[in-house]
Amino acid sequence: QYMKDVNCPFKIQERQETVDWLLGLAVRLEYGDNADKYKDSTPDGAKNADNTAKNAEPLINLDVNNPDFKAGVMALANLLQIQRHDDYLVMLKERLTQDAIAKASQSKEGLPVALEKHILGFDTG
């Protein structure tokens, strides 16, 4: 009943889309109720000049020996269907060479999407 009351464009079976739409609606309503409060706000990291410099290069402090990093690389390799290697850093280096990047840039897969034809579920104003 709630979904009908808020005019949700998705069916209950489309859970992920419905949740995304509801979150967008919540953000839109919260911002609409408190626009003056949020219009001049800045991200927490931008308040400190030191943090801004650190955020400019987020990969500088990356710990490649961290087990979470290794797990993330392996999960990404599975997702992208990249051939696995015993040393995950070698696997990354092979995919990040200039030749590999140039080859990937030439490949144009998928269909273009006209975003203006889709309902986002919120208005940025």
Image (cartoon, helix red, strand yellow):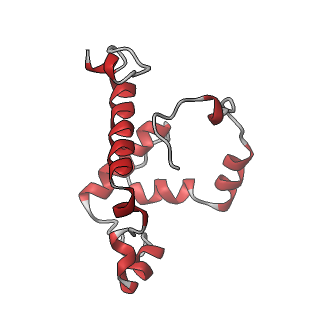
| Residue 66 percent across, percent down from the top left | 26, 63
Residue found at x 55% / y 55%: 94
Residue found at x 56% / y 53%: 95
Instruction: Determine the image quadrant of residue 76.
Output: top left
Say whether residue 111 is left or right of residue 28: right
Which of the two residues, 40 or 72, is positioned nearer the viewer here? Answer: 40
Which quadrant is the N terminus positioned in? top left
Which of the two residues, 11 or 25, is positioned nearer the viewer here? Answer: 25
In the displayed structure, would residue 83 be above or below residue 41?
above
Say whether residue 68 is left or right of residue 51: left
| Residue 102 percent across, percent down from the top left | 71, 54
Q: Residue furthest right?
A: 106
Instruction: Determine the image quadrant of residue 84.
Output: top left
Residue found at x 39% / y 43%: 28
Which of the two residues, 118 or 2, is positioned nearer the viewer here? Answer: 2
In the displayed structure, would residue 69 be above or below residue 1?
below
